Each structure stands twice: as structure tokens, then as C-alpha cells.
Image (spheres, grey):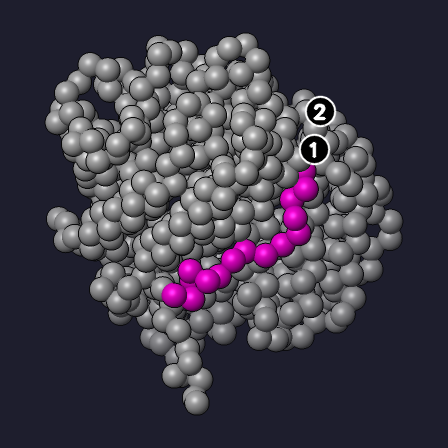
Amino acid sequence: MSRSVLSLPPWITHALRAQRGPVPWAAVGRGALAAGPVLVAGMAVGRTALGVLAAIGAMLAGINDRPGSRRASVKRLGVPALAGAVGLVVGTAAGERVPPLALTLLLTGLGLLAGCASAVGPVASAAGTQVLVAAALGAGMPLPEPGWARALALLAGAAWLLALRLALPTPGALAGDFRFDGERAAVADVYDAIARLLDAVGTADARTRRFALTAALDHAQDALTGPRLRRWASSAAERRLHTQYAAALPLAEAATALAWAGDPVPARAAEGPRRLAAAVRAHAPTGPLPAPSRDAPGLRALDDALLHAAHTFDRDGGHRDLHTRRRTVRGLLHSAFGPGGREYGLRVALSFGAGAGIAQALHHSHWYGQHAHWYWMPATAVFLVKPDLGPLVSRVLCRAAGTVLGALLFAAFAAVLPRPGGLVALVAVCGALVPVATRHFAAQTAVVTVLVLALVMVGGEPQASVSRIAETLLACLIVLIAGHLPLPGRRGGQVRARLATAGDAAGAYLRHVLDGAGSPGSPAGSGGSGRHEGPDDRATRWTLRREAYRALAEARTAIALAAAELPALARHSAGTDEVAVLLERLVDTTTACAVHLDDTGRLTPHLTERLADVLDELAARGEGVGDEVPRSHLARPSAGTPSHSTRIHTGA
């Protein structure tokens, strides 16, 4: 039988795919010490209901407890927890005072706002999820405690896990100051990614390795950035890590230029970055670094970057610039209420509002029997409608399978475990499994289902596995319908918004690089005459390059998810992957131009030809890279007198 017959459609293969990697033992330990102990604490003081809410707060924080630095975890765990507390207060007050129809409309409006805000970024998405889940809990789980007490309990559970994250060292990462083990690992991964890219230059793996380098740089940037009491890093160890991160940027630029050129490089070229990675991990001096040959602009740039690293690597250089720019209020509002944010917000509002309305109707018609809580269906709809958890059908399949498995497992456990001790132990075990289960949505759903059912039973609700399965299947149906409903505006708004952002970032980067370029025919020395950029110019260039590659990575992720949807949805994003490839070619070529300009002070005809070709292809597709691009520097060798500038519009 042919392979084409055996191949499965993308929306099925995505549901079967799981992330791989080593077991995060530190996160497993924190999970075991989080939900179970806070539940026990609540029971010990006679406030079991508040203990249940604290355990839910710890569980939600555990879902967001991903690898990274302690500083970054403050925002990644803290902001969603604060949003959840607000949602719990709002939901509790509304559930106590507002009639069912008005409550449904209120929750629908809250879903619209939270959905729009989720388009801003990953932390905002997690916050939007928690505010809606907590609002459903507050409105649909009647408890004797007032809303402010419930919110404090939820915050206490999340704060406990965050305290564990900040205080406990990571196993095997005790070299130097263990407070910065996440930052140290992230910076070392950047140097390793540079080495792997250099190993792959001239091979088919180079493009994939360049993607991996972008991901490593994004992760290191996020790990070093975060809330702080002072504006700049005050610890010598942290300043040293900032210096080591800054030293990686010219190496990454040179490696990208070499990968773009495609000519194989000497094997020893990758040895220097590999030794730097080992030095970062061991918190040790670099030692001697092998210099690559200097017979090409990229190799000369790589050698210069290694010399710079050897000079600054072991010093407290006091680098303050992490090559990020604070997002403006206007930019945040555009992300939230632009085409992508509006489309996502409307679908979240429809799914959450419909789930809340149907759940209340079934509740008041006594379909729930002895179960007084109706929060499950709208809370399930919130998780199902999130695009960052995978394509729509993949999410629905995984959620349905995970809920059925989790409910059946809990029914079996509830039949044999002693109460409440056995259920508390089950909560602790599930808390430990959450960090591992996040690798696949079905596994995460199964673990969370067991954990939540155990918590509500400890809180006094009877065994509810069958009703939870039915509610989950109804929520799946609601989200499938809401996801396929035609809405005002163009479909695929989130994908096109990400692509437009990538185009703007690529255009800004290109314009900055070409700003200092001489025209192809202008005299410039060859072989190292170079151009003289000040430190501020080079820092701006690296900031723009980081923004361009990060925006491209986000666009590629959104495109890959859209391509794995059912054909009825996937067709709305058709062709966007080709535009992303063109933008990648443009940014890679721009990086090669920057390295060449540093080396010789001018662009070669080959470089101008490549830039002009990709710009023409983008213009032919109606896509663009920003505002004015100085095309006078991109004249083809055979062309006549070039125009002074050409406006390349953004049409994504």
C-alpha cells in the first residue's frame, strides 16, 4: 500500500503528536509540594472549601510553570494568578446577585474582553484563560465564603507554588549563584545553538538549526527579562550573564550569515561557541578559543565575535541592554482589538457565553441531579477555544479523550481510596504529574480531570464522573460550532496579524541595515575596510534583528497551527506559509548584508540581486515589509539608473 494512502490528515497527526524532552524533575517536585499541602492546610484549620480553591490556584499555576528563569516565572505565574483572583471576585458577585440571563450576558462580555486581551502574548493569554475559568468557578460553585476570601485563597495557592519556584534550587544547577540557574542554562543553550548551526552550514539541516537558534535567543531574552525592584541588574552574577548574552549576538549574526551563504565552514568554527557554552554552564573561565579561518566575511565576523567574547566573557561588563523594546500602549491595544484580537475575542465570547448559558439551563432544570455546581462546561469551553493549545479539532479530540480517561480513572480511584486521606494523596500525585502531562493536551486533561474531581469530592460534592463526561462533550460541540461560524471580517485574522507584524519588523530591520550602505558602484575598500558603526547603531541593529526573527517565529507557529485545522478553516490561511518563507529569506539576506557591510563597507552585486528578488516577490504577492525601502542600494548590475525609493506596502 502506498505511503499516500497510509498518510493521515494534519488535524489527526497533530492530535497524536507529543512534545519530547527530559523529565522536569524540579517542576515535578514543586507540583507534589503545591496542591496537596495547601489542601491539607485548609482542612487543618477547618476551611476545606478555601483549601480546595487554594489547591486549584496551585494547579493553575502549575500548568504555567514552564522551564525558564526565576525572574520570568514571577510574571508567568503571578500575572495569571492575579487575573484569576479578579475573575473569581467578579464571578462570585455576579453569581450571587445577577439573574441567569443577565449573568450569561455578563460572562459573554467578559469572554470578549479576555479573548481580545489574549492576543497580546503568552502571559496575557494565560491571564485571559484564568480570569474566565475563575469567573465560572465563582459563579457556578456556590460556597459560603465571600468573594474576597475565595480570591485570597486562590492567590495563596498560586503564591505558594511561586515561592517554591523562587526558593528551591534546580537539581544539578548549583554552580555559582543558583538563583540564576535558569538564566545560565538559557544563555548556554544559545551558544550551543550557534555551534549546531555552524555544524550544519551547507547542509539541509541549516534552516532547522537557524530556527532552533532563534528559539534559543528568544528563550534567553525572556529568561533575562522580568520584573525587578531596580531598573538594572544589581547582582554581579546577573550582570555577567547579561554580558555573556550580549557576546552571543554577534556570533549568532555571523553564524546566520554563514548559513545563508551555504558554503561549508571548517569544523573548528563551531568549537569556540561550544566551549563558551560549557563555560557558561560550569560558571568557569572560557580558556583558549580556536579561531576560525578568515577567508570570507562571515568567518571574519565570527572570528571577531570570538575575540570580543574572549575579551569580555569573564568580566562584569555591566551590559544593561537586552535588545528589547517596551511595547507601547498603542501597540498593545492594536494587538488586542485589531483583526486577530477581535476574531479570537468573538469566538471566546461565543464559546464561553454559550457554555455558561446552557450549563445554567441544565442546572436549573435539575439535569445535574444532586450536583449543585455548573462551572465545568464554561470552564472546559475556555480551554478548548484557546488556539495556543493546538488546532481546533485536535483540541476537541484531546479534551474529549482526556476527560473520558480521567473521569474513568477517578471513578476507579474513588471506589477504593479512603476518604479524605486517599483523595488528598491523589491530589498531590496529580500535582506532581501536571508538569509532565503538559507535553500533550489529552494527558494534561486527564491529569487535571482527576485532580479537580478529587478536589470537589473533598469539598463535599458526590462522585460526578458521568456528568463531567457529558458536560465536556457538550462543551466540545459548542466550541466546534463557534469555531466554524462565519464572523464579520476576514477569516484567519490572527495568522495574518502575526504575518503583518513580521513584515513590519523585517522592513524596519532592512531599512536600518541599508541606511549605512553605499550604492553598489561606490568605491569602498575590500577585505576588511568595513564601515564604522557606533555602539548605539549596532545595538539598534541587533534589537531590530531580534524583533524580526521573533516575529517570524510567532508567525510560523500561528501558520503551522492554522494549517493543521480542518480544510474548512485551513483554507483561510492558505498561502501564508509561502509569505513567511519569503520574509525569512529577506531577514536572512539582510543579516548577510549587515555582516558584509561591516567587513567591506558596501554591498556586492550578488547581495543586491538577492535582496531585490525577494522584495519583488513580496511585492508581487501584495505583501510588504513596511514603509520606504532604499531601493537605490538594490539596483541589479544590468539595470539602468535605479529609482530613489520604492514603497513596499503591508498587505498581510
Q: Which mark is residue 566?
A: none
The residue at the point 64 percent across, 63 percent down is 197
For residue 13: magenta?
yes
Q: Position of 79 compared to 293: left or right?
A: left
Q: Are marks 1 and 2 in contact (CB under 8 Å)?
A: yes
The residue at the point 48 percent across, 17 percent down is 48
> Would residue 615 be seen by someone viewing this image from the given angle?
no
Measured as percent of width and height from the top left, residue 217 is found at: 58, 48
Q: Position of 340 compared to 205: left or right?
A: left
Query: Dot 1, crowdedness within 10 Å: few (<14), some or many (≥20)?
Result: many
The residue at the point 35 percent across, 31 percent down is 133
The residue indicated by pointer 2 is 235
Comparing 233 with 369, the one in front is 369
Comparing 46 with 19, the one in front is 46
In the displayed structure, 25 sits above or below 108; it is: below
How far apart, in angstroms, are the residues tagged by discs 1 and 2? Answer: 10 Å
Query: Dot 2, crowdedness within 10 Å: few (<14), some or many (≥20)?
Result: few
Q: For the magenta stretch, what is the residue range?
A: 12-26
The residue indicated by pointer 1 is 180
